Amino acid sequence: METKEWKFRGNIDLKSASVFSIARVIGDVKTNLNQSDQRPIIPLSIGDPSIFPCFRTAQVAEDAVVDALRSSNFNGHAPKGGALQARRSLAEYLSCNLPYKLSPDDVYVTVGAKQAIDVVLSALRRPDANILLPKPGYPAYEALSVINRLEVRHFDLLQEKDWEVDLNGLQKLADDKTVAMVIINPGNPCGNVYTRDHLKKIAETARRLGILVIADEAYGHLTFGSNLFVPMGLFGNIAPVLTLGSLSKRWMVPGWRIGWIARSDPDGIFEEQGIVECIKRSLITHTEAATFIQAALPQILEKTTDDFFVKIINILRQDADMCYERLKEIPCFRCLQKPQGSLFLMIKLDLSQLQGINDDMEFCSKLAKEESVILLPGFVLRMKNWVRVTFGIEPSALEDGLARIKAFCLRHASKC
Ligand SMILES: *Cc1c(COP(=O)(O)O)cnc(C)c1O
């Protein structure tokens, strides 16, 4: 047969978007694991505490899902944008820290916070538009910006100022095509929690620039330090805010795939600018969250008691303290700050203190090989020669992992 020139090719946008995938890089690190190591693998790379019994979700949450499923009332299609009961309970839940009340119309149910990111970015897309993303941040924003054809510009988070937004730098990046900025609070990957004062300054900056704030609060309420969690929606009267969240992290059920978008915009600017319409249209093109999880949402949000949250926070505080105390004794680690929220912290590697390790990927690969401990190399977060540590695991496993990291660093320490 004669050779044929086929006209189809893979989508180059998807190829370049996959560069920003944590899962892909962790897969690469894991190829180094030594199969004959009898010890358990310690996963300090990805934030999924649900695999550990101590982080099992609240019983009322499980019961709510079972009851909804067994009722057989929720086997049909879900309404676009979410079931009314689910939106009503979310509006109530998200209003509790705000000076005004959200209505069910201000809230949309999504398939986790990840889909919320996609929906919002697709609603914002315009020719030549750009978006300001934090560095370091959450790589899904880069990937989904590429797919939604938004130009990405990175502003710095300032390590020496507790990872606050570099607002001066941010203003220099913005131009008349800038549409939005993203903040992640409590912070992934830095474990920081912004003060009310800083959030207000962010809102004022956004107002000056005429842009909206996308507030990723996937770790909302998961704080255990001195800074309390303050929702960005508090400043929706200064600049309009789209808040993204989900059950995944606070309830430790990332597989349930339920999240939300909430508009904090008391002045109705989103409506005026056509954003509300576009979010609704975008939701029509996306899949809905599973009906029985939506049906369980009111029970989950209203009936989960403080004992569950307090128990989780206490374990995370113990984990964060242990992580900080043990890692700060290790000479090749720099810029370590005690995390105040989320499940993560960032550490800078001082490679001059290590022999035969030339970058963050090599550090993580050798650590996986020799100690069966998985860390995330910082380059995927645009922080070359840093590593991200996830401490949200069972404390005894964390202790084991930290001891192995220390042994590894001592073994590779450069001899002076
Ligand atoms: C985990 C995470 C998400 C996605 O959450 P899902 O609800 O599991 O889709 C979004 N943003 C940040 C910062 C996250 O860490």
Image (cartoon, rainbow, N blue to C red):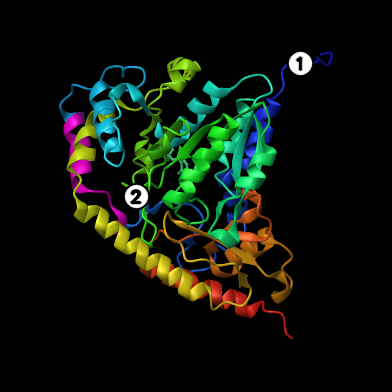
Task: Classify the position of the N terminus by image quarter.
Answer: top right
Residue 286 appears in the rendering? no
**Disc 2 target residue:** 221
Label 2 within 8 A of ligand 1 by Cβ: no
Picture coordinates of residue 209, whole percent (x, y): 60, 32
Name which residue lies at 42% across and 65% down.
320
The quarter holding residue 193 reads: bottom left
Is residue 223 in view? yes
In the orientation shown, which residue stands out farthest toward the bottom?
Answer: 416
State left or right for residue 241 relative to residue 31: left
Q: Residues within 10 Å of mark 2 (few under 14, many from 20)?
A: some
Q: Residue 58 colored magenta?
A: yes
The kind of residue tagged 1 is: Trp
Ligand 1 rendered quadrant: top left
Q: Position of residue 291 (x, y in %)?
A: 28, 25
Label 2 sits on what residue type? His
**Magenta portion: prevailing SS class:** helix
Examine the rendered structure and indicate whether residue 362 appears above or below residue 241.
Answer: below
Q: Nearer the viewer, residue 314 or 76?
A: 314
Name the spot of residue 370 as percent of width and height, x first. Answer: 59, 69
Instruction: Look at 39% across and 66% down and name the residue there.
Output: 319
Q: Which residue is mark 1?
A: 6
Q: Earlier in the sequence, mark 1 or mark 2?
A: 1
**Which quadrant is the C terminus positioned in?**
bottom right
Quick one: 276 or 209, which is closer to the camera?
Answer: 209
Helix, strand or loop status at disc 2: loop
Residue at x 38% of width, y 43% of height = 231
Give the residue displayed 30% in from the left and 42% down from the top.
97
Asked whether 64 falls inside the magenta stretch, the response is yes
> Magenta part of the protein: which range?
53-68
